[in-house]
Amino acid sequence: ETALYAPLPPAGRAHPHPLVAIIMGSDSDLPVMRPAARVLDAFALPYELTIVSAHRTPARLVAYARAAAGRGLRAVIAGAGGAAHLPGMVAAMTALPVIGVPVKGSSLDGVDSLHSIVQMPRGVPVATVAINNGTNAGLLAVRILSAGMPSLVDAMDEYMKKMESEVLAKVDKLEE
Ligand code: RP5
């Protein structure tokens, strides 16, 4: 998977001027969320990565979400499992685009997380990616930010071409 990305230096998980926030309900979500950070590293997009729990640190959640836009952040990737209220609560308190990552817990196969995140009421959207798909959350953040950064459109084009040629190489190998 990482072979698809250009080898750029990491933008860093605690960049001084992050454009993207990667937040998660618990450090146990890290294996699912780390791929989002890897994507942002590959596209050289500065981000910060931290834990914000809707249930265990509600005051931190409110402060973080309310301050996000003013701090210069342009998108939030929020991952959580179980009763996964984090992405929706963030979306309720910021005008920034919020991408939700349903994290598969030890029971219910992650369907509980998926339903908690995807079923937002009208007026408060969360762009929900597939269960455990931190990679797509990162890629979606790149696409959202590319609206104001044409160089990111070119970089995404390059990523897609590379992905295509890797699949076509597999097709050739199979047909050999
Ligand atoms: C959620 O509860 C977290 O997002 C995590 O996916 C889940 C379990 O958390 P831990 O008990 O592993 O800290 O808040």
Image (cartoon, rainbow, N blue to C red):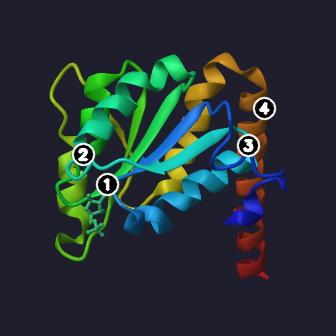
> Which mark is nearer the camera, 4 or 3?
3
- Dot label at residue 80: 1
Q: Is residue 60 above or below residue 73?
A: below
Looking at the rendered structure, the kind of residue marked 3 is Phe
Which mark is drawn over residue 154? Answer: 4
Residue 43 badge:
3
**Residue picked out by circle 2:** 54
Q: Nearer the viewer, residue 66 or 114?
A: 66
Secondary structure under tag 4 reads helix
Q: In this view, does 156 lie to the left or right of 96?
A: right
Q: What element carries label 2?
A: loop
Sequence-wise first label, 4 or 2:
2
Label 2 lies in ligand 1 vicinity (Cβ under 8 Å): yes
| Place of residue 122 in the rendered image (x, y in percent of width and height, measured from the top left) | 17, 23
| Amino acid identity at mark 2 | Ala
Q: How far apart are marks 1 and 3 (CA)?
A: 24 Å
Name which residue lies at 38% across and 18% down: 95
Of callouts 4 and 3, the N-terminal one: 3
| Location of ligand 1 given as a quarter of the image | bottom left
Mark 2 or mark 1: which is in front? 2
Q: Residues within 10 Å of mark 2 (few under 14, many from 20)?
A: many
Residue 104: image x %, image y %? 30, 67
Q: How far apart are marks 1 and 4 (CA)?
A: 31 Å
Tell me the element at label 1.
strand
